[in-house]
Image: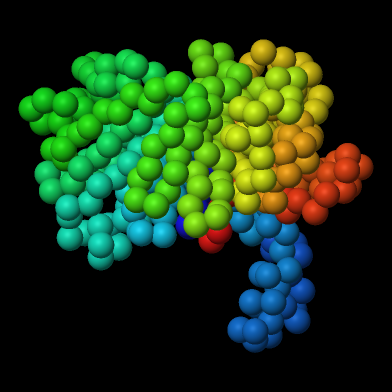
Amino acid sequence: MKISFWGVRGSIPTPLSPLQIQNRIAAVVQRITPKDVISADAREKFLASLPEWLFGTVGGNTSCVELENDQGECIILDAGSGLRELSLNLRNRPVHTSGGVTYHIFFSHFHWDHLQGLPFFGQAFDPRNRIVFYSTDPDLRERLNYQMRSPYFPVPLEGPGGFNAALEFVHLGSEGDSLKIGGTLIRWKRVNHPGGCTAYRFEENGVSFIYSTDTELSREDFLDTPENRLFFSGADLLIMDSQYTANEALEKTGWGHSSFSSTVDFALTWGVKKLALFHHEPTYTDKKIFSLRQSAEWYRHYAGNEPIEIVIAREGMEMHL
Ligand SMILES: [Zn+2]
Ligand SMILES: [Zn+2]
């Protein structure tokens, strides 16, 4: 399966400000020496030497992750503002421009940052397509319709002028159930977050991947129960809410998010192979977010030193599992 990140910020879209961009350009200019610009090669080398927070960004869009399974089916996790980027990208893929595609969109929950990209999912306006929405919330259909209702948005979800694709709404039953899309087995589990949130586990051809955003880890998540083992253990990739530093998590107990250190603890407990820190705090700069990888690495070393690969989720990142 192939995982692509289209939105990785938490809570609210966070574009770079004009001042931040000016400061970056000034910092880059300050680093240039004459030998860095004597040839195209030297320029490339110089750019590659810049720290990722200076030459890049984690991106400002809110949660949206794409899973393309081994049969090429398109599974979308959350519809944050990153969904618009995915929609634009799909326009350049031949399979998706010829129409007749089914898109499977799974919602973790219905906070704005997981929903606000949905009205901009262009493929939903193509009558040849089919969109299947999934949630553990029995009011899924009503929730989605409500947020596109006047005066909140000029175009409705269903009805005249609304989405033209065939729409289906699937209420996911109790934990322990599962469903299959092509060769991909999907399970779900409720996690700790104000108003509730659902994590998903995907398995295909011996590979497993967990998407667990908006999660305030608690003692129960670390208990060695059959349910926890079935859902959490041995994932090849875990994308997990790591919004805060350890200090900030203490100040924001009950806000529904985890610190990178508790996420690393969790990954160590459940034998995760690769951990992507996700749902970045909107008030943190790129410099601070990228520095969390080093801190998480240090903490992993201190907490058990298991060989978990830790990455900072950023827009445009792709992983093949
Ligand atoms: Zn969120
Ligand atoms: Zn939330």
Count of marks placed on residues: 0
Q: Closest to the observer: 203 or 153?
A: 203
Residue positioned 78% across, 41% down in the render: 268
Q: Is residue 223 left or right of residue 160?
A: right
Q: Is residue 249 left or right of residue 146?
A: right
Tell me if residue 62 can be seen. Answer: no
Q: Is residue 36 left or right of residue 160?
A: right
Q: Is residue 5 above or below residue 199?
A: below
Residue positioned 57% across, 27% down in the render: 214
Furthest residue in direction left, as rendered? 160
Q: Is residue 76 above or below residue 149?
A: below
Q: Is residue 65 above or below residue 107?
A: below
Q: Give residue 153's position: percent from left, percent from top.
A: 25, 24
Tell me if residue 193 can be seen. Answer: yes
Residue positioned 61% across, 19% down in the render: 192
Q: Give residue 284's position: percent from left, percent from top.
A: 67, 35
Q: Give residue 160's position: percent from left, percent from top.
A: 8, 27
Q: Is residue 255 above or below residue 25?
A: above
Residue positioned 74% across, 25% down in the render: 223
